[in-house]
Amino acid sequence: MLQLTKVTKRFGQKAAVADVSLSIPDGSFVGIIGRSGAGKSTVLRMINRLIDPTEGSIQFGGRDVTALKGKALRDWRSDCAMIFQQFNLAGRLDVLTNVLTGRLNKVSTLSSVLNLWSDNDRALALAALEQFDMASFAAQRADSLSGGQQQRVAIARALVQEPRLILADEPIASLDPRNTRLVMDGLRAINREHGITIITNLHSLDLARSYCGRLIGMAAGRVVFDGTPDELTNDIARELYGLESGDVMDEGMDANSASGLIPAPGQQAVAA
């Protein structure tokens, strides 16, 4: 269980996140939605401890995440894998080596520097790539891949960390519709097949409704909606996004028929 209790993050006098309290059971697939600047990414980065909360506490499985330091913090970041919009791969390295870097916390520094990975580590990395249909690219440089392929490699790297939790910060923001589906299908497969908790920030309401079992809506740093996709009505969506609501209801794939959402009056959904 991931537990956030009255978590606040201030940058100077500005509260990017204010008084957020959440309980997320193990094995959940949660989407965090809201406008740019609503505090979504800040919440994920505090959970991973890339930034520290100003106030409040974060706990996971009885462990006080906000108090971790040194090796304990490194261990937490291994348990809590992070996937970024920018992929964060080493372009000059081959795909397999990029995925193997997800094992760094489980091997000695000398082994990683000398690229002395065990057969088990290599097998895990290849199996993760195979799960995302990327094993045939194992020997290619990462910077030779398309954006969608790089993101699938980044997810494979997260998977070989053997995490209990994966945080995906706008993982499909720069991808075309096909790669959007491949990445979201991959995250759903990780959640269902491995029981790993997934928390992802998404801009598209239709994608969030289609893939996530729970949606958390944020505005001005606060949680203003927490419920199932069926409970996310058009009125709530307009409260979250205002005039942008028609755009975010159908972005990247045609899901209107599945979600039952319609554009706001006077607006048209973007065609897939």
Image: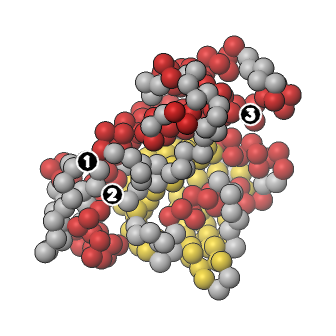
Do the numbered discs 2 and 1 sit on residues whose CB atoms are within 8 Å?
Answer: yes
Q: CA distance from mark 3 to mark 1?
A: 36 Å
Residue drawn at (51%, 43%) of the image:
197
Q: Give the numbered dot on residue 253.
A: 1
Amino acid type assigned to the residue bearing label 3 in the image: Leu
Q: Nearer the viewer, residue 83 or 208?
A: 83
Q: In which image quadrant can residue 159 be found?
A: top right
Q: Which residue is mark 3?
A: 104
Amino acid type assigned to the residue bearing label 2 in the image: Ser
Q: CA distance from mark 2 to mark 3?
A: 34 Å
What is the crowding at mark 1: few (fewer than 14 residues within 10 Å), some, or many (at least 20)? some
Q: Give the numbered dot on residue 204.
A: 2
Residue drawn at (61%, 16%) of the image:
123
Q: How many circles with numbers are drawn on the protein? A: 3
Q: In the visual, does 30 lie left or right of 65?
A: left
Residue drawn at (46%, 49%) of the image:
171
Q: Residue furthest right?
A: 110
